[in-house]
Image: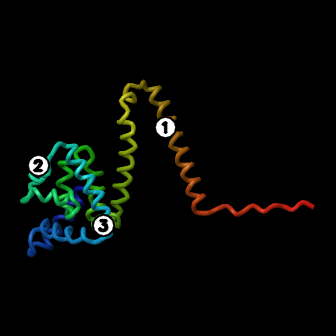
Amino acid sequence: MLMSLARQLQSWSGSILGGVGTATDMAMTLAQSRVQKPGPKAAVAKAAALLRDLRQAAGLSVDDLGRALELDDPSFMGLVESGKVGLPFDLILRMAAVLGRNDPIGFILQMTRSYNPGTWKTLEALGIGKLVVQAGREREFANIYRSHDAARNLSDADFAAALAFTDAAFKTALAFHAGLSGTRTKAPPPKTRKKST
C-alpha cells in the first residue's frame, strides 16, 4: 500500500515537472539545497551514517551501490554518505530494494523522515505515517521473538507460558512508563504538616 502511494506521488511529480527535466534531477537539486540548511543537517548526518553502515553490511562499495541503483554517476552515493547531498524520495524507494531487503518499510520510513521531511509530513497528514509507525513497532516487537533461536524450540505449552510472561512484562513496562509520564507532567502537591497542639 505504501509503495503504491509512493509510486503514485512519484508519477504525479514526474508529470508535473516533465518540462523542467526528470523528477529525479529536480529532486536531487532540491535535496542538495535543503541539506545546506542547519535544521536538517543533523538528521542527514545520522541518516548518512546509517546508509554507510547498511551499504558496508551488504558488502557493497559506494560505486557498487551507485551501479545497483542505476545512477548516471555512481560516485553520487559518496556525496550522500558524506552528508553533502540529500536523497530524493524515488531514490530512497530504489535503495529499499537494495539495502532494505529485510525491512524495506523501515528503511523507507527512516530515510524519508531524514531526507524528505515534506514527503513525510504529507504521508502523516494522510494518516499513512501512523499506520507505518504502528507496523514498524509491531515488526520490532516480532523481531525480539525472531532474535531468540531458543524460542522456536519451545513446546506449545512452554511458548504459551513465555507469551503470558511477556504480556505481563509488557503491561508492567507500560504501567511504569505511565507512572513516569504522570510524575513529569504534574508534580504532587506538597504535603502540609499538621501542627500538634
First in residue order: circle 2 vs circle 3? 3
Which of 20/181 is in front? 181
Q: Secondary structure at mark 3?
A: helix
Question: Residue shown at 10%/75% (left/top)?
Answer: 20
Instruction: Work out whether 117 lies above or below 2.
Output: below
Residue at left offset 78%, top offset 63%: 192
Mark 1 and mark 2: Cα distance apart in space: 43 Å
Cα gap from disc 1 to disc 3, whole angstroms: 38 Å
Please identify the residue farthest to the left as the structure is shown: 72
Q: Amino acid at mark 1?
A: Thr
Amino acid of disc 2: Asp
Front position among marks 1 and 3: 3
Q: Residue at x 20, y 45 (%)?
A: 56
**Tag 1 and tag 3, C-beta contact below 8 Å:** no
For this rendering, which residue is in front, 2 or 177? Answer: 177
Q: Nearer the viewer, residue 86 or 117?
A: 86
Helix, strand or loop for disc 2: helix
Q: CA distance from mark 2 to mark 3?
A: 27 Å
Residue 166 tag number:
1
Q: Amino acid at mark 3?
A: Pro
CB-based contact (under 8 Å), mark 2 and mark 3: no
Farthest residue toward the bottom?
19
Task: Residue 48: give its label.
Answer: none
**What numbered label is drawn on residue 40?**
3
Q: Quadrant of the N terminus?
A: bottom left
Image location (x, y in percent) of residue 100: 23, 48
**What residue would you read off at disc 2?**
64
For residue 44, side relative to residue 171 (left or right): left
Q: How many marks?
A: 3
Left or right of 144? Residue 102 is left
Depth check: give the residue in front, 118 or 76. Answer: 76
